[in-house]
Image: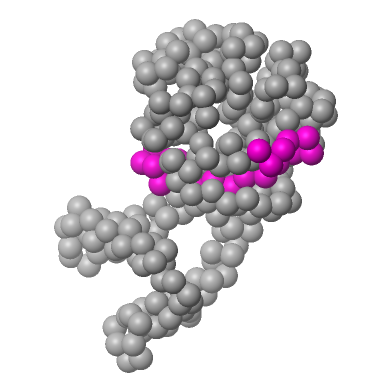
Amino acid sequence: MNKKIGFIGCGKMASAIIKGIKTSCCKEKVAIKGSEVNCEIAELAQSRLGVEVLTDNRLLTMDSDVIFIATKPNYVAQVLEEIKDEITPEKLIVSIAAGVNTTKIQNIIGTKRVVRIMPNTPALVQEGMFGICKGEYATEADVQYVMNLLNGIGKVVEVEEHQMDIVTAISGSGPAFFYQVIEDMARAGEKLGLDYEKSLLLATQTALGSAKMVFERGELPVQTLIDNVATKGGCTFVGIQTMKEENSEKLFYDVIDKTAEKSSQLGK
């Protein structure tokens, strides 16, 4: 675990991972640096994250064992062209760019080791969710290293690369969808006469507790948890019936489907 880790790009997602690592059990075992080509942005990132942020991507690559490509998807090719001569066989590339597959990366940097992940911002509070897959030349040890690094700030699931756009839609974009649901519930409570902040607390803690119940359900299907609350003829049952009448299942299918489709387009 004693490696130098470099982040090319220190935006929101990279910041979440950096801050998550710095507060996790891995913090004593890694040295983290970042890079931003704009001097002013680099200074701000350095102040915000508490790590050295360079303005030279090639220098960062040379000085790192593991390089996270954390730019926007449309800048990935440009960055890889810039640093490809500095990527030795000993270095590991980890891409967090949505929609950019490992084949596209390897077409630029050759037979180097690439691991692709899809993180999400709850890594900031050590509750991140990560999808991970490996490129053609990466090893199982590479995947395990990245998984061990991320396990300190959330949970990790390994998938096939063709499934990564679905992961992006469910967990990468998912926090915003849950925020929207919580906000909608809180606003509904407000419209019905409850103070907004109290309504928001009710919705937020209920979401947190419900998620924990799902994690700790053992072999029980989620439907059983629903049925345990929504007893026939009760108030929750009426609410569930309303959701079914409004076809909430189709709504969320469409949300995930369209988000996954957009993810697949980002890397083209």
Depth check: 87 or 187 in front? 87
- Relative to residue 194, is residue 110 drawn left or right? right
Q: Is residue 129 a member of the stretch shown in magenta?
A: yes
| Percent x, y of residue 164 | 66, 49
Q: Quadrant of residue 68?
A: top right
Depth check: 104 or 259 in front? 104
- Relative to residue 156, is residue 19 drawn left or right? left
Q: Residue at x 37, y 18 (%)?
A: 50
Q: Is residue 266 visible?
A: no
Q: Residue at x 73, y 36 (%)?
A: 138
Q: Is residue 106 a member of the stretch shown in magenta?
A: no
Q: Is residue 232 visible?
A: yes
Compared to residue 123, the image places residue 236 above or below, namely: below
Q: Quadrant of residue 186?
A: bottom left
Q: Residue at x 39, y 22 (%)?
A: 49
Compared to residue 184, the image places residue 132 above or below, namely: above
| Percent x, y of residue 233 | 32, 91
**Color encoding of the figure:** one colour
Q: Residue at x 39, y 66 (%)?
A: 216
| Percent x, y of residue 159 | 66, 52
Please state the extent of the stretch shown in magenta in the rendering: 121-141
Report how many numbered discs are placed on residues in the image. 0
Depth check: 235 or 230 in front? 230
| Percent x, y of residue 149 | 51, 36
Compared to residue 167, the image places residue 74 above or below, namely: above
